[in-house]
């Protein structure tokens, strides 16, 4: 009977776990809808802004632009974006693994530092000498507590200042790009310096328009805004990916718990049946002993 009690306790425990994982799945599904709407609405705007910038840049020499300066890479800043919470499968580990690959591989000779956006990567990187932080970013490093364009702009402006002041010669962003609830792709994008656009043929549609103010002034205004939009889109992508990954992970956890509960219930019924059979045999054996 002790074995029956142990199995019964496990079934009760798994039933409670199923209720938790099922509730977390529904919460993530609701958050995913909002996050997915936000990122799908942002992508066309970010894409059009980039298209305008590329169109104007095609007829300009951006080599003198502060954000396009190509120089020897002696110091690299890696912006790693994870979530603040776990229980989302390999979502956070994939980012941490990619950041470590960059530190130990491509940028090992470029004094790499990591700006951690998200508690999970911060908990890992802060134990090393690669962690980067400054007082200006302290209030917005936990950006997922309040994910707004204003907070993203603060980070974007700070990254631009770090590049133009030559504290860092290159800035890259590592984040999860949202595809759907079940698929998130780890992306590594160069944030600064701006990569020159390769134009195919003689397509320069900007020549058909008059610009006021000049194209140079427009580009100088668009570049900082485009960079901030790029960072904000990466954060929105990561947020949607997090909820999708957690919803998928909790769905699998609920299914696994359901399978385990079914197996334990079967084991419990078998053990209970065996115990009842043994009791019947003992009663019958006792009755025969009395008759004899």
Image: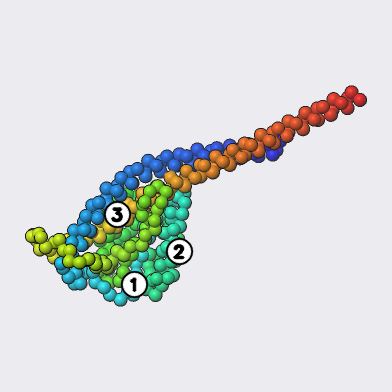
Q: Position of residue 234 (x, y in %)?
A: 32, 56
Q: Earlier in the sequence, mark 1 or mark 2?
A: 1
Disc 1 + disc 2, Cβ < 8 Å? no
User: Eyeballing the image, is 97 above or below 106?
Assistant: above
Disc 2 + disc 3, Cβ < 8 Å? no
Q: Is residue 143 left or right of residue 285?
A: left
C-alpha span from label 1 to label 2: 20 Å
C-alpha span from label 3 to label 1: 25 Å
Q: Quadrant of residue 195?
A: bottom left
**Dot 1 surroundings within 10 Å: few (below 14), some, or many (20 or more)?**
some
- Label 3, on which residue? 233
Q: Position of residue 216 (x, y in %)?
A: 13, 65
Q: Nearer the viewer, mark 3 or mark 1?
A: 3
Q: Is residue 209 left or right of residue 240?
A: left
Q: Quadrant of residue 261?
A: top right
Who is closer to the viewer here, 290 or 248? Answer: 248
Q: Residue at x 33, y 46 (%)?
A: 36
SS at circle 1: loop
Residue found farthest to the right: 292
- The quadrant of the rendering that contains the N terminus is top right
In the picture, the disc for residue 127 is 2
Q: Is residue 230 left or right of residue 289?
A: left
**Dot 2 surroundings within 10 Å: few (below 14), some, or many (20 or more)?**
few
Q: Quadrant of residue 164?
A: bottom left
SS at circle 3: helix
- Label 1, on which residue? 75
Q: Earlier in the sequence, mark 3 or mark 1?
A: 1
Q: Residue at x 24, y 55 (%)?
A: 47
């Amino acid at each position: 009977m002790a074995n029956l009690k142990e199995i019964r306790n496990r079934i009760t425990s798994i039933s409670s776990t199923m209720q938790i994982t099922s509730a977390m799945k529904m919460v993530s599904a609701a958050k995913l809808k909002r996050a997915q709407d936000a990122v799908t609405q942002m992508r066309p705007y970010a894409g059009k802004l980039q298209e305008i910038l590329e169109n104007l840049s095609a007829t300009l020499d951006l080599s003198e632009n502060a954000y396009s300066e190509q120089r020897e890479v002696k110091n690299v800043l890696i912006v790693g974006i994870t979530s603040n919470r776990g229980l989302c499968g390999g979502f956070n580990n994939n980012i941490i693994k990619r950041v470590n690959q960059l530190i130990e591989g491509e940028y090992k000779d470029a004094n790499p530092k990591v700006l951690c956006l998200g508690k999970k990567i911060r908990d890992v990187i802060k134990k090393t000498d690669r962690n980067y932080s400054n007082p200006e970013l302290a209030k917005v490093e936990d950006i997922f507590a309040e994910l707004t364009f204003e907070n993203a702009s603060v980070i974007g402006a700070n990254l631009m200042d770090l590049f133009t002041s030559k504290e860092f010669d290159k800035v890259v962003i590592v984040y999860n790009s949202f595809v759907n609830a079940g698929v998130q792709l780890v992306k590594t994008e160069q944030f600064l310096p701006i990569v020159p656009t390769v134009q195919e043929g003689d397509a320069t549609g900007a020549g058909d328009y008059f610009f006021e103010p000049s194209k140079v002034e427009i580009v100088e205004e668009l570049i900082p805004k485009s960079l901030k939009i790029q960072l904000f889109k990466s954060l929105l992508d990561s947020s949607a990916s997090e909820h999708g990954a957690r919803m998928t992970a909790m769905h699998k956890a609920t299914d696994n718990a359901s399978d385990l509960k079914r197996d334990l219930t079967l084991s419990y019924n078998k053990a209970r049946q065996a115990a009842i059979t043994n009791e019947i045999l003992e009663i019958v054996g006792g009755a025969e002993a009395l008759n004899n």
